Amino acid sequence: MTAWGVYAAVVEAPASPARLPVTSPTAPVRPLVTSPTSPVRPLVTSPTSPIGWRLRDTEGLDVLIAGFPAGSWATNCYVIAPGPGQPCLIIDPGQDSIDGVHDILREHRLAPAAVLLTHGHIDHVWSVAPLSAEFDVPALIHADDRGRLADPAGTSFAAAREQLLAMTKNSLELTEPSDVQVLHDEQTLELAGMRLRVRHAPGHTEGSAVFELDELMFSGDVLFAGSIGRTDLPGGDHARMIESLRRVIVPAPDDLVVLPGHGPQTTIGQEKATNPYLVPLLADATVPRNAKGL
Ligand SMILES: [Zn+2]
Ligand SMILES: [Zn+2]
């Protein structure tokens, strides 16, 4: 597993758009409960390490968010749960993510209820079949990306395909998990004691989706801190990406904390103010195409 750092998102709204991490300089730093055995530890933030614990105090519930960048593409894998000792959801278990997921499950005594996928690119779905099988849980992916689960090399971006085949010694044999459930736009998921809203946001792939959980958004490769997902890969479509940004991202509240598929966390407000793709969109100017990144 990739080296652990610790970051934590304090998710009350910053008083003003803040630089990453998402803590307002005026907001009181408060202790973060991380596990029953280490009752309180100081809030530590690191803008480069998308790993964290979050304390939610609405409804008197803690919500656990843990994550780490996995594999060659540093794809953020997240584990979310209502609290320690609870059912949990695994989001985007990519390459070499299994050990990291196990570490989180063990430390917090979590039991997976499902694996949630923001889209079907190989760097996000690499470990979904083994984890689904190990815990006998379904994998959830938008209907329009389901086909990628069974054809990871064929639908991977060209630049990565050679690397992918080399890494797997030309024997890439990822298969679709035995239980796949497809998602649709505006579906509400009640899983592991949490309620998530599914928003279909095509453009990076046909079946890209973002998941909203209270004041959090898991944005996959739709929106990053300072960028958006590239649209030149198979299934990519610049016009659809713009439409998704307009429909799903722009109307979202400024204080929504965004946990993306790669890189550090951000907020909707921060991105609307500075993201080189959202700024022109909001000004009705031409939005550049993105053919970089992941
Ligand atoms: Zn992707
Ligand atoms: Zn990705």
Image (tube, grey):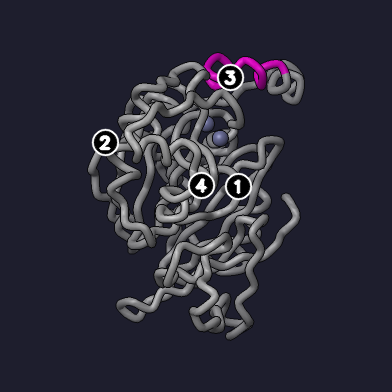
For the residues labelled 4 and 2, the Cα–Cα distance comes to 20 Å
For the residues labelled 4 and 1, the Cα–Cα distance comes to 7 Å
**What residue is pinned by disc 1?**
263
Give left or right: position of 105 versus 113. Answer: right
Q: Is residue 159 magenta?
A: yes
**What residue is pinned by disc 4?**
260
Report the amino acid beneath label 2: His
For the residues labelled 1 and 3, the Cα–Cα distance comes to 19 Å
Q: Is residue 28 magenta?
A: no
**What residue is pinned by disc 2?**
184
Observer-nearest of 272 and 136:
272
- Find the magenta span and give its range: 151-162
| Residue 132: assigned label | none
Beta carbon of the mark 1 residue lies under 8 A of ligand 2: no
Residue 78, position as x, y percentages in the image: 53, 53
For the residues labelled 4 and 3, the Cα–Cα distance comes to 19 Å
Local SS, label 1: loop
Give left or right: position of 156 versus 215. Answer: right
Of marks 1 and 2, the one in the foreground: 1
In the image, residue 106 above or below residue 146: below
Beta carbon of the mark 3 residue lies under 8 A of ligand 1: no
Local SS, label 2: loop
Report the amino acid beneath label 3: Phe
Mark 1 is surrounded, within 10 Å at the Cα level, by few (under 14), some (14 to 19) or many (20 or more) other residues, namely some
Mark 2 is surrounded, within 10 Å at the Cα level, by few (under 14), some (14 to 19) or many (20 or more) other residues, namely some
Observer-nearest of 254 and 145:
254
Report the amino acid beneath label 4: Pro
Compare marks 1 and 3 and give the one earlier in the sequence. 3
Q: Are marks 4 and 2 in contact (CB under 8 Å)?
A: no
**What residue is pinned by disc 3?**
157
Of marks 3 and 2, the one in the foreground: 3
